[in-house]
Amino acid sequence: DQQVKQNSPSLSVQEGRISILNCDYTNSMFDYFLWYKKYPAEGPTFLISISSIKDKNEDGRFTVFLNKSAKHLSLHIVPSQPGDSAVYFCAASGAGKSTFGDGTTLTVKP
Amino acid sequence: DAGITQSPRHKVTETGTPVTLRCHQTENHRYMYWYRQDPGHGLRLIHYSYGVKDTDKGEVSDGYSVSRSKTEDFLLTLESATSSQTSVYFCAISDFGQGSYYGYTFGSGTRLTVV
């Protein structure tokens, strides 16, 4: 049973536009939600996180939104840049566990 | 970034042979993790450590063992490699454990091919 799902394997957007990456989870006990970015041949890099008691967290061009009633979170990147092209992993943590989604490949076209 | 290094970066090995992957950190973080990444499966936890000589199993631990004799080193051993263990292996470190707001720092990965 996959507790964290990223239903879109890929996303393509134009440079300067908004990128929205989505993630759904099933376990209401998660306390924190995190996003990582991964370039080819490198390890994932922590990007941003949000506590379950918040509904929004912002860091520069990156904003994460949490909808607890829908068990859904999203990462918004505005404006998107070609350097943002990477695989983005959603993760959920709590009760001593951390679970990752399968990732979404974002391509930002110049 | 030299805070966490994995060796080797690439390895090809034969079915049935033992293989050891090494993770070395210079951050003095308490927690260390081994993950594998496979297409369609994201990152799955193999084993983790919460201190020297303190380790526990993750969700895909069968066929793997680990050891942590020093804070800075976490070794992953495939006791008898099988083709299903062909994967990219990532080591990660953190100061706050799994259920945390703070993310992990990952190494660059080891691409292992079992033929």
Image (spheres, grey):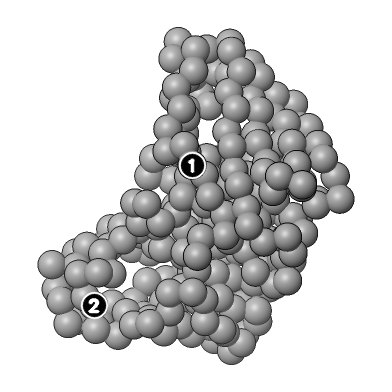
Badge number at residue B53: none
Residue A72 lies, with reference to residue A14, above or below; the image says below
Q: Nearer the viewer, mark 2 or mark 1?
A: 1
Can residue B60 be seen at all in this image of the molecule?
yes
Residue B12 lies, with reference to residue A59, above or below; the image says below
Q: Residue at x 58, y 23 (%)?
A: A19
Give x and y (percent) for residue B112: 27, 63
Secondary structure type for disc 2: loop
Give the letter of the chain under mark 1.
A
Q: Amino acid at mark 2?
A: Ala
Q: Residue furthest front?
A: A69
Disc 2 crowd rating (10 Å Cα; few below 14, some 14-19, many 20+) is many
Q: Residue at x 43, y 79 (%)?
A: B61
The C terminus of chain A, quarter of image: top left
Residue to which mark 2 is pinned: B81
Give the letter of the chain under mark 2.
B
**Would you identify the image quadrant in which residue A20 lies?**
top right
In the displayed structure image, the side of residue A90 where residue A56 appears, left or right: right
Give x and y (percent) for residue B110: 36, 59
Give x and y (percent) for residue A36: 58, 45
Can residue A46 be seen at all in this image of the molecule?
no
Q: CA distance from mark 2 to mark 1?
A: 32 Å
Q: Amino acid at mark 1?
A: Asn
Q: Residue at x 75, y 41 (%)?
A: A66
Give x and y (percent) for residue B94: 66, 63
Secondary structure type for disc 1: loop
Badge number at residue A7: 1
**Depth order, front residue of A105/B53:** A105
Residue B79 lies, with reference to residue B109, above or below; the image says below
